[in-house]
Amino acid sequence: MGVLSNKIGKETLKPGDHIYSWRHAWIYAHHGIYVGEGRVIHFTRAAGQEVGTGTALDHVIFSSSAKRAGPPCEVCGDQSMASGVISSCLDCFLSGGELYLFEYGVSPVFFLAKARGGTCTLAVSDPPDDVLHRASYLLEKGFGVYNIFKNNCEDFAIYCKTGLLVITNISVGRSGQASAFLAAASTIVSSPLRYLTTSVSGLATVGCGMYCVSRLVSDIGIRRDVKKIPVETLVNPSAFDGPTITMNGVSTETTVPTASDGPPSIRKNING
């Protein structure tokens, strides 16, 4: 592994590893937690629809990923319509793609050298036993409703590795892929900064600088609107809400918002 690639071989996998595989010609990556014995726990909207918008556009913009030819997997069965937190064999998780390892505790320089988001973070991973406990717990309890920008497969894997949840409602979730997309969009929207320079190289420098800064401040290891939440405080989410937690004796819940809302955040519900 290194700056150019996080690709690894199956023989190097260890329980608790955060892994991913690129989908749809490298448009996005699907993330999960390797739990050993050839199994992966991951969060999905539905097979091949991890990037779904939840609208009719899904059938036009994102077709289903390559379906398994022949009979269902002898290990997993038919998971083509499965959604939420599920357990799959490694081959079904990869869906014909290559295997990559998500890196934790990288330096800011290394992070920025990885121009593509969703491959590493400055945040430090917890011990493997903690990671496996969170993944197994959420396999049973769920992780709320899938949302491409605010509660996706990468958010799930990062929570399993770090225990960190976003506690504000003003930005995207923990996903590096979503942050990179929004960083690129903000660079384009901020095109008036072109007036700061008239040269092509100057425009490129300004745009690259904005993109890098936006990605860096959005990383889970840098941002301050996160809190470490024990997985035991999460309870079964409803069909519309994210995981509910209890803090200081007050029932709160992390909401999985609609496309117009903010990220998974903590909302107080004081009863009685």
Image: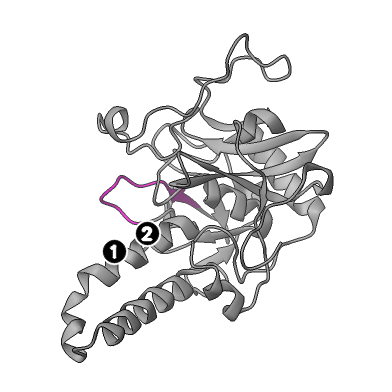
Q: Does the magenta stretch include residue 253?
A: yes
Q: In this view, does 245 lie above or below 68?
A: below
Of all residues, the one furthest to the top in this rendering is 71
In percent of width and height, residue 111 lies at 57, 72
Question: Is residue 236 visible in the rendered structure shown here?
Answer: no
Q: How many discs appear? A: 2
Q: Distance between the residues labelled 1 and 2?
A: 6 Å
Crowding near pointer 1: few (<14 within 10 Å), some, many (20+)? Answer: few
Q: Residue 185 carries which label?
A: 1
Q: Do tag 1 and tag 2 residues touch (Cβ < 8 Å)?
A: yes
To which residue does mark 2 refer? Answer: 181
Q: Which residue is drawn at 54% across and 68% down?
A: 114
Callout 1 secondary element? helix
**Which amino acid type corresponds to the residue marked 1 in the rendered image?**
Ala
Q: In which quarter of the image is residue 267?
A: bottom left
Residue 234 in the image, given as x and y percentages of width and height: 59, 46
**Residue 110 as seen in the image, left or right of residue 189:** right
Question: Residue lying farthest front?
Answer: 200
When the figure is inspected, residue 124 is found, relative to residue 56, above or below; the finding is below
For the record, the magenta segment spans 252-262
Quarter of the picture holding the N terminus: bottom right
Of 3 and 73, nearer the camera is 3
Q: Is label 2 in a helix, a strand or a loop?
A: helix
What predominant SS class does the magenta segment belong to? loop
Q: Residue 97 in the image: x percent, y percent?
A: 60, 38
Within-10-Å neighbours for mark 2: few <14, some 14–19, many 20+ = some
What's the residue at 62%, 49% (across, down)? 233
Residue pictured at 73% horizontal, 42% vertical: 34
As drawn, 237 above or below 222: above
Location of residue 86 in the rendering, given as x and y in whole percent from the top left corner: 61, 30
Dot 2 amino acid type: Phe
